[in-house]
Amino acid sequence: MKIMVAIRIALRALRVNRMRSALTMLGVVIGVAAVIAMVAVGSGATARIQQQIEAIGSNLIMVIPGSITSNGIRLGSGAVVTLSEDDARAIAAECPSVSVVAPFVRGGVQVMYANNNWATSVLGTTPDYLVIRNQPVAQGNPFTVDDVNSAAKVALLGRTVAQNLFGGADPVGQTIRIKNVPFLVDGVLSAKGQTPTGQDQDDLILVPISTAKRNVTGASQANAGAVGSIMVQAAGPGAIDQAQSEVEELLRQRHRLQPDQDDDFTIRNLSEVFAAEESAAQAMSILLGAIASVSLLVGGIGIMNIMLVSVTERTREIGLRLAVGAKMKDILSQFLVEAVTLSVVGGVIGIVVGISASALISYFAKWSILVSPTSIAMAFFFSALVGISFGYYPARKAAFLDPIEALRAE
């Protein structure tokens, strides 16, 4: 029997019992829709974490002042300044696995423009900070190494600061006051959004590190080169561990620490934190997909059940066809095509329902949703596989009926 003939016969048989066919497909529809929606939720969570990684900075290593012991008292991390700009320059020059280094100092300030003012943070750093954070300037121009060397009073505003000081006006070229010191706005940073902990990354002002020490945060004459932290970017994702080891070894040498002494600095590899979060999101995606697949399995069982009922109801028809010369493979293909048609049509409807459900979840729950073509293709493939798998037994049972016994059936 030609496949097109089998499809026409199958569709005719399904149209005879439209309600039963529709209810049978419902299980597949729900299963496919659930798989697409749940995988979209999990993929959206994974994509969101990847965006957060990119927002904070790729291949990022943070070096912060560590705890030290003074007169038997162990002070906490950052209690004493132990890092300097010379340390940052040494890391950039002597660590092969490091690509970019940016020292910085931070301080809270009240910034003013005309009649507006805003409480924010000022970050004194170098131009390499923008490279590490993957944060280009959206308007205007970034400050330069010459600005750092000359302690120029220039500033780059985060989106939040620019909005609160200037509203919809263009800040570039305007003069703001930080601690009553005038600063020229060179540019506005591209938006970064919130960190995983909810901190607004756009609520800050970047200035040259030399300017920050001189006019904003202050610097002691005894330790003029001190910095609050050093941001390090490894040469690549596979070089993070090596870069971390090189930085640790170099700083211990520079700080003249003995083998039995603790580090007076702390190195944090943020990739480890995000890797754990990403693994959790992927595991959630797999779990949600597996749970949703149960619905698809139930739909397949429904198809098998209805096809067995159909074989029983059409036993006499099967016997008649076998008696007039139909082959076993013709009967097998007829019922198999019916089962596959039920599952494929249900799969197509399920894809539409699943995409719609994903959009509704995103709209009402405010979750990140990512419907990928791969998940749609997989859901459709498995819906067809369900039809073949669960339709084969009823089809085989119909094909192996004895023609004489089948003709006697009432």
Image: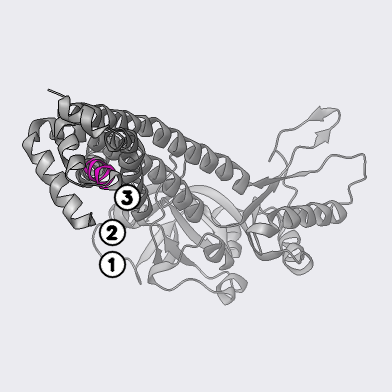
Whether the residues at callouts 2 and 1 have beta carbons within 8 Å, the answer is: yes
Which residue is nearer to you in this view: 398 or 221?
398
- Looking at the image, residue 200 sits to the left or right of residue 332; the answer is right
Does residue 143 belong to the magenta stretch? no
Q: Quadrant of residue 311?
A: top left
Which corner quadrant holds the C terminus?
top left
Label 2 and label 1: CA atoms lie apart by 7 Å
Q: Residue at x 35, y 44 (%)?
A: 385
Residue picked out by circle 1: 170
Which residue is nearer to you in this view: 4 or 104?
4
Which residue is nearer to you in this view: 336 or 301?
336
x%, y% of residue 42? Answer: 40, 40
Disc ID at residue 376: 3
Q: How is the image coloured?
A: one colour
| Amino acid carrying mark 2 in the image | Phe
- Looking at the image, residue 396 sits to the left or right of residue 363; the answer is right
Q: Is residue 124 above or below residue 296?
A: below
Could you tell me if residue 186 is visible in this image?
A: no
Which label lies toward us, 1 or 3? 3
Label 2 and label 3: CA atoms lie apart by 46 Å
Judged from the image, the secondary structure of the residue bearing numbered disc 1 is loop
Judged from the image, the secondary structure of the residue bearing numbered disc 2 is helix
x%, y% of residue 301? Answer: 31, 28
| Amino acid carrying mark 1 in the image | Asp
Q: Residue at x 35, y 33 (%)?
A: 292
Which residue is nearer to you in this view: 65 or 219?
65
Which label lies toward us, 2 or 3? 3
Residue picked out by circle 2: 166
